[in-house]
Image (spheres, grey):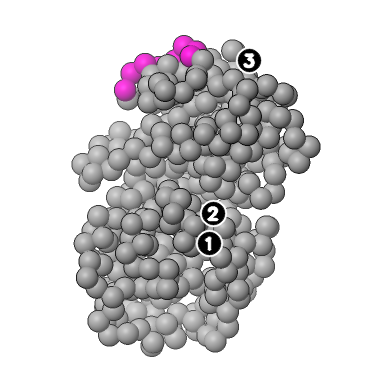
Amino acid sequence: MKFGRIGVIINPIAGMGGRVGLKGTDGPDVLARARALGAEPVAYDRTRRALARLKSIAPNARLLTPQGALGASDLTDLPLQLVPGASKDETTAADTMAAVKALTSAGIDLLLFAGGDGTARDVAAVLPRGLPVLGIPGGVKMHSAVFATSPEAAGHLAGLVVLDDPRVSQREAEVMDLDEEAVRSGRVSATLFGYVTTPFERSMMQNCKAGALTSDDAALDALARRIVREMEPGRLYILGCGTTTRRIKRALGFEGTLLGIDVVIDRRLLAADVTEERLARLIEGAKATIITSVTGGQGYVFGRGNQQISAGVIESIGRENVMIITGERKLTALDPPCLRVDTGKEATDAMLQGYWPVHTAPGRIMMMKVAA
């Protein structure tokens, strides 16, 4: 596939709901609410990062993209070949599907798209069987196995595909999506929508999100009770999303936000389901600790579903005030056996890399490598 033709599609609204705590950006009403809360687009920047890495690996790759918001409108400085597509500012799932069809008709060797699970669904719905597809992670929720571990990894892997590098194989990857309305009601309802072919190199592709392992329940409940007992008076505790950190919330006496960020002080709830903006205001001048968990099967600590804890928030609080908790079996099931961060800021990701103690039970830790 040397000197291959790469199709590029960008979902311009992907990821906008993350930092404002909306758990996604599916539907015009949610998008309008995200914008009202001050959400900014993130997909174009993440695409630029991916394409910069791609061109550094395979400078002769030919990039094809639709006209308008799904591709060329914000990438006018890049050497892109245009194909017909939606030129309107507000695009829909139907526009994404039409763009996929236009690019495949133009004869591409790989489809590279920026978005989240919803975009992956739209792409998979019309993708010709056997055509490889690769996701640049740009959404709020990315449970599907079609995404690279970071924008740079997506670009690097796409470049290796163009060069026909023998390290790259192909695999059938799951396309999953959550019901956003159910998530906002505190229920997790994930559905498998199908499989697509993706390029695969073990260190560059994320796995499909896996569920919790019940064998860790007793240890994690005991850990939650100990964390509560040892909470420092006057310190803010930022409790991340998911079932593991919800154990701490329950030990404090409230249910909390399953897939949101809650803040406590002096063992009481201070703020529930906070946005990045509110979180930044709360921690200003305060002592604070972030307690976060690990996404099962993927190993992410930051950057998958908890974008409210942004690079700026992490930098303000400091690496030394981040605590990672998760089940031991969840850690041993990771392949490759490392944790990951994707905060959207290279310097913050670099600060977080290295070896971390991960708390799995009272008095028990596992040292895990964190990579970007």
Which residue position is annotated with label 2?
372
Q: CA distance from mark 1 to mark 3?
A: 40 Å
Q: Quadrant of residue 218?
A: bottom right
Q: Earlier in the sequence, mark 2 or mark 1?
A: 1
Which residue position is annotated with label 3?
107
Residue 338, percent from left and from top: 62, 61
Is 104 drawn above or below residue 134 in the view shown? Answer: above
Amino acid bearing label 1: Gln
| Closest to the observer, 305 or 246 | 305
Taking the magenta stretch, the answer to whether it contains residue 295 is no
The residue that appears at 73% across and 39% down in the rendered structure is 168
The residue that appears at 46% across and 50% down in the rendered structure is 346
Q: Residues within 10 Å of mark 1 (few under 14, many from 20)?
A: some
The span shown in magenta is 82-89
Which residue position is annotated with label 1?
353
Quadrant housing the N terminus: top right
